[in-house]
Amino acid sequence: MQFGLFEDKPHSYASLDELIDAMMNMTDDPLYPAGTNMVICRGNPEAKLMIIGEAPGPRENELGKPFVGRSGKLLDQILGAVNLDLDKDVFISNSVFRMPPGEAGKNFRKPNNEEIEYYKPYLLEIIRLVDPAIMLLTGNVATQSLLGQTGITKLRGQWFDWNGRHVMPIFHPAYLLRNPSRKPGGPKALTWQDIQEARRKLDELTANG
Ligand code: URA
Ligand code: URA
């Protein structure tokens, strides 16, 4: 499968700090005219586990960090359940780096295909510089960006080999907030299963150096 690692944008950067600096000064991206803030990443850039979300929401736009609103709190809990600390054991970023402004009384919307494609080379560059062994893709947007597929209900919980990295789509925490049932086979129970499997894989890779 072709994952499009070789787009000509952006140029490669020597360090994550350099890339972040360039992104913070970006003015030619499709969401720049919206006037929302550039929100790039947080967590430990040395972590083996990277989580890739969709796009910043209002809280993230305000604070300039990914997953610091309600979805982020739930993500903290999901990771905490398998003893992973979001600031220590995980590096976290998004597929789109500015909040897409909402229309019709909503303060934000889902990113569109043009936005996902535009920001993808930057996501690829972050991945290259952070070099995670495992990546969890939360929801359809991240899965579309990286694997070129959607259909999270079918894809979640499976490992994909993405350029030598272990990649698993999981449900987006915002989806779990909308579907909070804990019944067996429901999205929360399945996510619980998926995070345990991710932890197992992480331990396996750590044990093997
Ligand atoms: N949802 C996301 O996908 N990313 C964030 O940063 C916040 C909410
Ligand atoms: N749609 C998404 O984008 N993510 C989910 O987790 C579920 C539905």
Image (cartoon, helix red, strand yellow):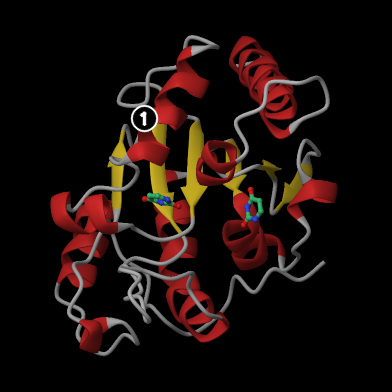
Q: Tell me where residue 102 sits by quadrant.
A: bottom left
Question: In the image, is residue 73 above or below residue 103?
Answer: above
The image position of residue 128, as x and y in percent, is: 47, 54
Question: In the image, is residue 10 above or below residue 139?
Answer: below
**Which quadrant holds the N terminus?**
bottom right
Q: In front here: 43 or 36?
A: 36
Which residue corresponds to the image point at 58% horizontal and 77% vertical from the top-left? 6
**Which quadrant holds the C terminus?**
top right
Question: In the image, is residue 138 above or below residue 119?
Answer: above
Which residue corresponds to the image point at 30% horizontal and 41% vertical from the top-left? 69
User: Relative to residue 58, is residue 86 drawn left or right?
Assistant: right
Secondary structure category for the residue under label 1: helix
Residue 47 shows up from this direction: no
The image position of residue 33, as x and y in percent, is: 22, 89
The image position of residue 23, as x and y in percent, is: 24, 70
Q: In front here: 80 or 180?
A: 180
The three-letter amino acid code for the residue at tag 1 is: Lys
Which residue corresponds to the image point at 28% horizontal and 40% vertical from the top-left? 68
User: Relative to residue 183, is residue 20 drawn left or right?
Assistant: left
Which residue corresponds to the image point at 64% horizontal and 42% vertical from the top-left? 171
Q: In front here: 34 or 180?
A: 180
